[in-house]
């Protein structure tokens, strides 16, 4: 009786099996980092395409299903300029040292509006992206950061109004105009720091969404948007400089209109902006691991 052997039987080469095992990648395990400070810049850089997508999404959603679209970036500061000019320029008679009040006000209003809008958007960014936070891993820091970066688009559009107004009043810019990106960067760092704080707190306590507009309104009167900063005298100037937006607004007016430069108080504002940014980043990273559970 013959015994039939399978014709498809083949020997296994040990070297081939070893190379096949090396080709199989080990699973990636994602777990919370330990320690007080665990921020990884390389992690955020690895997700730079996602950050760009979030910025583009925020720009599109902001004007989605609107009749005027991106024109609101020009309409809003224009209407505010008209109101402030009537109240503070005509009725209150604020002294601007020879600068036309509409020009004086708009030079401070644009950086302030950038700060106020981006802080408001960043404060609600995590809660608004709750569906993504619960499902997919990515650096959560990208969400409030994208809200601030998206505000640069609106700022660029509204800045055209200021240039047109300078042409209307025949007011030439100063050579220091090339320093404007530095003051805008200072405003961005401050907005990011405040946005990190508010978005992280808002993930647990929804009171933040109600308190943020009130906070921004108080911050407006503590910033020389509708009045010159020289009204604050003496030792109050050092306390006043703790508001980084004071140097931002004064820096914009100095670079564009030739007003008095921020001076040494600029150093205090920069140090305060760095403190706000660093502490906001620290707190955001400390509670980031809980976002998926509490949002």
Image (cartoon, helix red, strand yellow):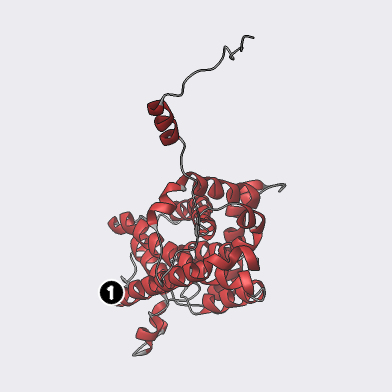
Q: Disc 1 on helix, strand or loop?
A: loop
Q: Position of residue 131 (x, y in %)?
A: 67, 55
Seen in the picture, residue 163 relative to 288 is either above or below; the reply is above
Residue picked out by circle 1: 263
Residue 133, quarter of picture:
bottom right
Query: For this rendering, which residue is in front, 192 or 158?
Result: 192
Q: Which residue lies furthest to the front in this view?
A: 1
Q: Which residue is drawn at 46% across and 44% down?
A: 26
Q: Where is residue 37 in the image (x, y as percent from the top left)?
A: 39, 69
Quadrant including the C terminus: bottom right
Q: Which residue lies furthest to the top in this view?
A: 2
Seen in the picture, residue 184 relative to 52 is either above or below; the reply is below
Q: Which residue lies furthest to the bottom in this view?
A: 235
Q: Position of residue 19 (x, y in %)?
A: 40, 30
Q: Which residue is drawn at 49% across and 48% down?
A: 28
Q: Where is residue 165 in the image (x, y as percent from the top left)?
A: 48, 55
Q: Residue at x 45, y 52 (%)?
A: 163
Say how many tags the image has.
Answer: 1
Quadrant including the N terminus: top right
Query: Within 10 angstroms of label 1, few (less than 14), some, or many (20 or more) residues?
Result: few
Residue 22 in sight here? yes
Residue 98 in sight here? no
Query: For this rendering, which residue is in front, 223 or 46?
Result: 46
Residue 188, quarter of picture:
bottom left
Q: Which residue is drawn at 58% across and 77% down?
A: 215
Seen in the picture, residue 12 relative to 51 is either above or below; the reply is above
Query: For this rendering, which residue is in front, 57 or 213?
Result: 57
């Amino acid at each position: 009786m013959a015994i039939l052997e399978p014709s498809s039987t083949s020997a296994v080469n040990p070297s081939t099996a070893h190379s096949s095992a090396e080709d199989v990648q080990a699973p990636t395990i994602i777990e919370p980092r330990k320690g007080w400070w665990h921020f990884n810049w390389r992690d955020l850089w690895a997700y730079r395409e996602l950050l760009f997508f979030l910025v583009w999404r925020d720009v599109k959603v902001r004007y989605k299903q609107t009749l005027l679209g991106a024109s609101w970036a020009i309409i809003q500061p224009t209407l505010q300029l008209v109101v402030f000019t009537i109240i503070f320029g005509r009725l209150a008679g604020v002294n601007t040292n020879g600068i036309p009040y509409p020009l004086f006000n708009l030079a401070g209003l644009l950086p302030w509006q950038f700060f106020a809008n981006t802080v408001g958007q960043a404060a609600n960014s995590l809660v608004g992206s709750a569906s993504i936070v619960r499902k997919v891993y990515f650096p959560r820091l990208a969400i409030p950061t994208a809200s601030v970066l998206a505000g640069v688009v609106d700022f660029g559009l509204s800045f055209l109004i200021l240039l047109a107004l300078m042409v209307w009043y025949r007011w030439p810019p100063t050579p220091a105009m090339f320093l404007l990106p530095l003051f805008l960067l200072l405003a961005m760092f401050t907005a990011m720091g405040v946005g990190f704080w508010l978005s992280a707190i808002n993930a647990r306590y929804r009171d933040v969404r109600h308190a943020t507009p009130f906070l921004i309104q108080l911050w407006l009167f503590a910033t020389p948007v509708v009045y010159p900063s020289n009204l604050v005298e003496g030792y109050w100037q050092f306390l006043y400089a703790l508001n980084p937006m004071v140097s931002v607004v004064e820096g914009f007016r100095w670079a564009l209109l030739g007003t008095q430069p921020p001076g040494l108080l600029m150093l205090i504002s920069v140090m305060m902006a760095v403190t706000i940014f660093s502490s906001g980043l620290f707190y955001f990273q400390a509670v980031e691991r809980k976002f998926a559970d509490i949002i």
